[in-house]
Amino acid sequence: MKIWTLFYFSALIGTPAGKFHIPIIDDNQDGTVSIQYQPSEVGSHQLDVFCQGQPIAGSPFKFHVDQVQSGYVSAEGRSKSWNSM
C-alpha cells in the first residue's frame, strides 16, 4: 500500500473494521499541514502521522466517528497536543 506523502510527511488511518485508508495531506503554506479523510464507518479510528518515516510526537492519534455523512470535521494540533474543534 502506497502512503500519500507531502514532502517529508505521510499518514495512515486505521478503521474499526481493521481496514487502512490513506488520507490527503495538504501544505497550508504556513508551516502546518492539513489531513483530509472522509470516514466510511462509525467507531474508533486511529491516525498515524509520520515525518521522514518516523511517528510525530503524540502519534498515533485516536478519534471517534459518531455518524458517517459528508462534510468536514476539523481538528488541529501542535507538537504534543491534539485538540478537536
Image: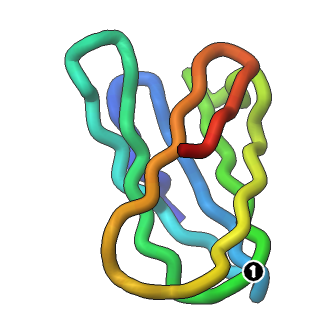
Residue at 63% across / 72% down in the picture? 20
User: Is residue 76 found left or right of 26 in the rendered image?
Assistant: right
Residue 85 position in % (x across, y down): 54, 44
Which class describes the residues within 10 Å of circle 1: few (<14), some (14-19), or many (20+)? some
Q: Secondary structure at mark 1?
A: strand
* Relative side of 26 to 84, left or right: left
In the image, residue 21 sits, relative to residue 48, either above or below, namely below
In percent of the image, x 36 and y 63: which residue is there?
Answer: 72
Residue lying at 75% horizontally and 80% vertically, measured from the top left: 43
Q: Amino acid at mark 1?
A: Gly
- The residue lying at 57 percent from left, 85 percent from top is 67
Q: Which residue is mark 1?
A: 43
The quadrant in which residue 27 appears is top left
> x, y (%) of residue 13?
62, 61
Q: Quadrant of residue 49?
A: top right
Q: In this view of the protein, which residue sits in the foreground, 32 or 25?
A: 32
